[in-house]
Image: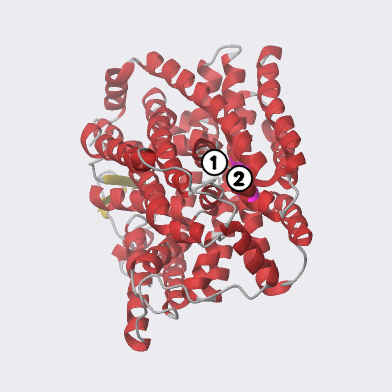
Amino acid sequence: MTILDWALILGLNGSIVLYGLYLARGTRSSADWFLAGRRLPWWIVGISMYATAIDSSDLVADSGGTYTLGFSYFVTNWVGTVGGWTLAAFVIFLPMYRAGMYTNAEYLEARFGVGARVISVFVQVQFRTMVLAIIARTLYLTLAIVCGWGASAWWAVVLIAVLASIYTAFGGLRSVAITDSLQFLIMAVTAIVFWSMIFNHVGGWSGVREKLAAADADLPGQMLHIGRDKVERENVAGLDTVVIQRKLLTGGRYDPEHDVIERRTPAGMVILSMIILGAAYAIVNHTQAMRMFAARSEWDFKMCAGLAGAMLVIFTFFNLSVGVMGRAIVPDQAILPNGEQDAIYPHLVKQLASVGLRGLLVAGVMAAALSTFDSIGSALSALLTRDVYARLIVRNADDRHYLRIGQWLTPVIIGGSFLYVPFLEGGMLLFYLDLTSAFVVPLLTLYLIGVLTPMHRRSGTIGLVVGGLYGIVRLVAPTVAEAYGVLILPAAMINPYAAYLYSMLITAGTTIVVSLIVGWQPRGELTHRETGEWLNRSREEAKHLHHDGHVSPRALWPVLGACVAVGAGLVLSFVVFW
């Protein structure tokens, strides 16, 4: 790294942080902090949604994921998240926006009771602080490998987290959304420049295919096509027969000639799990809902989904195909630093980028990290302040009190996320996939059930608990099988990809059983009204902060924008790369 590289990194990101602090001057009330006064136009909301969705984990951890999974993971963004944003804008979040709600958890009490609301908050805290830890580790890998800092790179990561905490705590959503839009520009430029450099280095798609085939004849099909079964091979050479038999309890076929256990998951199951994963991100994740709730009108609220979706479709290709091309360049994972798949992105930066470009790429990773550090910090602070603190602990303080609680919680959340870091060394994306199926998918199911079905109010919390219990049992089942030779779930229900479907079916099935016993209620009926003075007053005020001044002929633009984004994702997934 040269002085020019560091000038680019510090100049680009430092100026954005300072501008975020400047914007913080206008924050005077909780509505300003949590909802940006509901004054944001659709294009700022859409860009901020995209910038929050694409963080340094997408550049580094997800590149590590596509290094292993190939194009099948692209479906998560192209179909799951884009479709989830569309569903949120036109169906799931719209009643919340009209009711003046600040968080998506508020809806769950109105529909299913306080238990569902509180569980939702803590699931989201678990879900998103894990992502913050992934971001921290991707920053560490980038700085340690590209800059050669080793373990000392953690000090730089902590400094970046502190900076994000400061301008987020003071400025709230308005500062975050506008700085996200500026950080997007850095991210976009670096994504296209880096992709072009690697694409030329590897010799285009024909070069990628040839290099993958040279490493393993099956690799081109698995890596470059979505519609292929997922095949995983575990080397068991030297293991005792009893150990091998216990491993086989959870599924797979033993090949004694090569001493490997092969586990095959049908392509349809992999694709379905990726779609559910993407939809869960878009709907359960309050960092997305918070931005949409800040839209200045219903037209802007709907329009932002198409813009965010179109940007995600385009930049998913540039960002995530780096991992696929990286597999062609470095087919043997053992060659990567510490043998980690997650090191592929910083490894390519170090090996291939020139002076100046290397600084620009590190600046892009840092901008992506900042854009999500601030977003998750503010979103989780909003959830804990409104849905736990104001709802259950201090109900009738003044507006300034809750504003201060939200501000102080931000650095606590960002700092606490570092506790996840030790668990991420085995592959960040794979760890994320496991925990998402266990805890987040039941919550996604409940949002869908709440809006689309007549399930009884009391069924929601019970469904969440039962779905979560299945997720926990599934996580420990492989360990129990290998350690004690006891299979506590059918092998099909242990498969990490099948778990997404089973989690939805178990959660939904539980709500159906409960509703059959206690009765049904009108579809989407909201029966709870806030009892806390501040919660009720702030919600009523929020209803009047937006206006609907946009009329025909632009009324159809949000629908057209969403259709274009969803259609592009479907064509790329099921035609171009199938």
Q: Quadrant of the N terminus?
A: top right
Name the residue rendered at 74%, 56% in the picture: 403
Label 2 SS: helix
Residue 252 in the image: state x and y as whole percent.
28, 55
Marks 1 and 2: CB-CB under 8 Å? yes
Q: Which residue is mark 2?
A: 375
Judging depth in this view, the residue of 274 and 327 nearest the camera is 274
Label 1 SS: helix
Judging depth in this view, the residue of 422 and 254 nearest the camera is 422
Question: Residue 20, relative to residue 302: is it above or below?
Answer: above
Judging depth in this view, the residue of 331 and 170 nearest the camera is 170
**Amino acid at the residue labelled 1:** Thr
Name the residue rendered at 28%, 43% in the picture: 258
Label number found at residue 221: none
In terms of image quadrants, where is residue 134?
Answer: top right
Judging depth in this view, the residue of 542 and 266 nearest the camera is 542
Q: Which residue is mark 1?
A: 52
Q: Which residues are magenta?
A: 372-378
Name the residue rendered at 36%, 54% in the picture: 276
**Amino acid at the residue labelled 2:** Ser
